[in-house]
Image (tube, grey):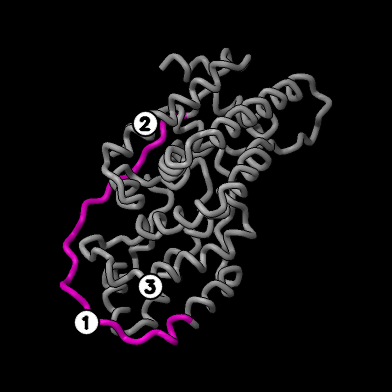
Amino acid sequence: MRLAAPDMRAEVEDAAIIEASLTDPDRFGALFDRHAPLVHRYIARRTGRDIADDLVAETFLAAFRRRIRYDTSYRDARPWLYGIATNLIGQHRRDETRQLRIRLAAVPDLDDPGHGDRVAADVTARAARRVLAAALAGLPDADRDVLVLIAWEQLSYDEVARALDIPIGTVRSRLSRARSRVREALARTDLSATFKELLTR
Amino acid sequence: MNDIDPITELIAELAPSTPLASAQDLAPARRRLMTALATEDPGPAATARPAPVSRTGNRRSSQAGWRVALAGTATAAARPAAPASSSRPI
């Protein structure tokens, strides 16, 4: 199931909106209304909310200026928008790294920290998140782009290929490399027993 | 269809639970866009009607021990059981 499916209940498809905006620019606002919340969340997850507020506008401005080159055989413009957003995120890699290392590593505080088992579990969770966040932050940018678009944004391989303008074989190889690096990072820690289930697959 | 990989699922669990921005939150960005649109010259005529394209999606595997370990006992206990394919808010 796609968690982030575009709102296709509206009868007008993205491609048709983009087509119409070539002669009536105001129509492009409908594309913003349909996809801006998801694109904003994607950027916010990677760089933080403050930067997302700015980059979401830049994403749609860039999309608007490039709309004449949009391939209208693709009804859903979401991968195209994610690709533009990903390029813009590339100009904020330091913010992304900070976001990964600080925010992702955080586990909500315990309401009742007195219970020994809970404290132990919380310590494990924090340690695991730190390892994973560091592994994610340490990935080559291109590999992280693919992994995040698939894991967080639920894009298919085809959609990622389209978003990043790369062959689907490259999507697969980058994803495979990213997974291997995360798996290796887990295996190097004393959490390997906890994640044995994953490391042996 | 993407293949289901536990490492990808693990990374998915790491995604910040960022809520979707409201129309009010996005209003400044929308204003910026609409200002740009207002100054835009009309472009060339639209091209041919688009052809249908296939759509694919992802699936998530069921709850696993590592997922609970990653969340921590407290958060896992506090969270109601969710369907395997909708463990994160939209």
Q: What residue lies at 22% left-to-right and 51% top-to-bottom?
A: B54
Give percent across and percent down for residue B75.
66, 35
Crowd around label 3: few <14 · some 14–19 · many ≥20 (10 Å): few
The one of B6 and A148 positioned closer to us in this rendering = A148
| Amino acid type, label 3 | Arg
Mark 1 element type: loop
Image depth: mark 1 or mark 2 in front: 1
| Amino acid type, label 2 | Ile
Callout 3 touching callout 2 (CB < 8 Å): no
Give percent across and percent down for residue A77.
33, 61
The label number, if any, that marks residue A190 in the structure image: none
Residue A73 left/right relative to A189: left
The label number, if any, that marks residue B45 in the structure image: 1
Image depth: mark 3 or mark 1 in front: 3
Displayed quadrant of residue A13: bottom left
Residue B39 painted magenta: yes
